[in-house]
Image: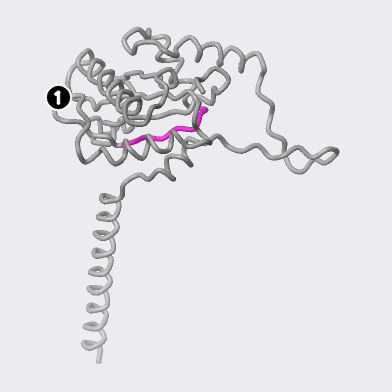
Amino acid sequence: MSKMSGRRKFAAILSALTLGAALCFASGTARAEDNVTEDQILHALSPAKKPPLTRGLSVGPQTPQADPTAVAAEAKFVQTIRGRATRSLSVTEREQIATIATTKPNIDLEITFDYNSAEISEKSLASVQALGRAMTNADLKGSTFIVAGHTDAAGGEAYNQDLSERRADSIKRYLVDKYAIAAGDLVTVGYGKSKLKDPSQPLAEVNRRVQVVNMENKTTAAK
């Protein structure tokens, strides 16, 4: 009786392990085959909607109002980088862009390129096209966007900086040529390997990415 019970327990455990492994494999495959969609990009880059003001009614904690002086200074800075060549941005300006970007709607896209090249790979065209369609949506059209190139930690700093800049420029050219997005609405910047998404794995594929940020600056953007 105890032997039979032991066998049943062993069979149950083996079955659970087999099922668990199958689920993990299926889940991993699904993630690998998923492509970012226009709706996902649109959602990620859309500013949070502000709740309507209700006269004489206050419910819950109130979001602190942004400092008007800081907002004006940020808008002025964004205006100064619009239309600038990628290589003309100073280290200080690149860092200022990165600081502002942390508070803005953004998305990381795993866009791959041909080896040692700024040519967008065939398998990544769908993601770039989804980005182009999202940017022409009425909710986003006319905003100022940062297109930031990042590399992994392989290679020297100068090499990676140059490669990240060329790849960001490549995305910009595609969006301007294929989707008629105003060139002035796209600010390209390269960070090389200075801002790894996963510093614990400096050579991981997740670090080779293009980040797109909506700077929410429609007042100065081309319409």
User: Which of the image's four quarters has the N terminus?
Assistant: bottom left
Residue range in magenta is 103-109
Q: Is residue 99 left or right of residue 69?
A: left
How many circles with numbers are drawn on the protein?
A: 1
Report which quarter residue 28 is drawn in: bottom left
Is 117 in the magenta?
no
- 60 or 223: which is nearer to us? 223
Residue at far right of view? 56
Is 105 in the magenta?
yes
Rendering coords of residue 154 (x, y %):
18, 25
Residue at the spot 50% in from the left edge and 20% down from the top edge: 222
Instruction: Report helix, strand or loop for mark 1.
Output: loop
89 vs 29: above or below: above
Q: Is residue 49 left or right of residue 117?
A: right
Label 1 Cα crowd, 10 Å radius (few <14 / some 14-19 / many 20+): few
Q: Is residue 203 left or right of residue 96?
A: left
Report which quarter residue 126 is drawn in: top left
Residue at the spot 61% in from the left edge and 38% down from the top edge: 49
Rendering coords of residue 159 (x, y %):
19, 16
Q: Which residue is mark 1?
A: 116
Residue at far left of view? 115
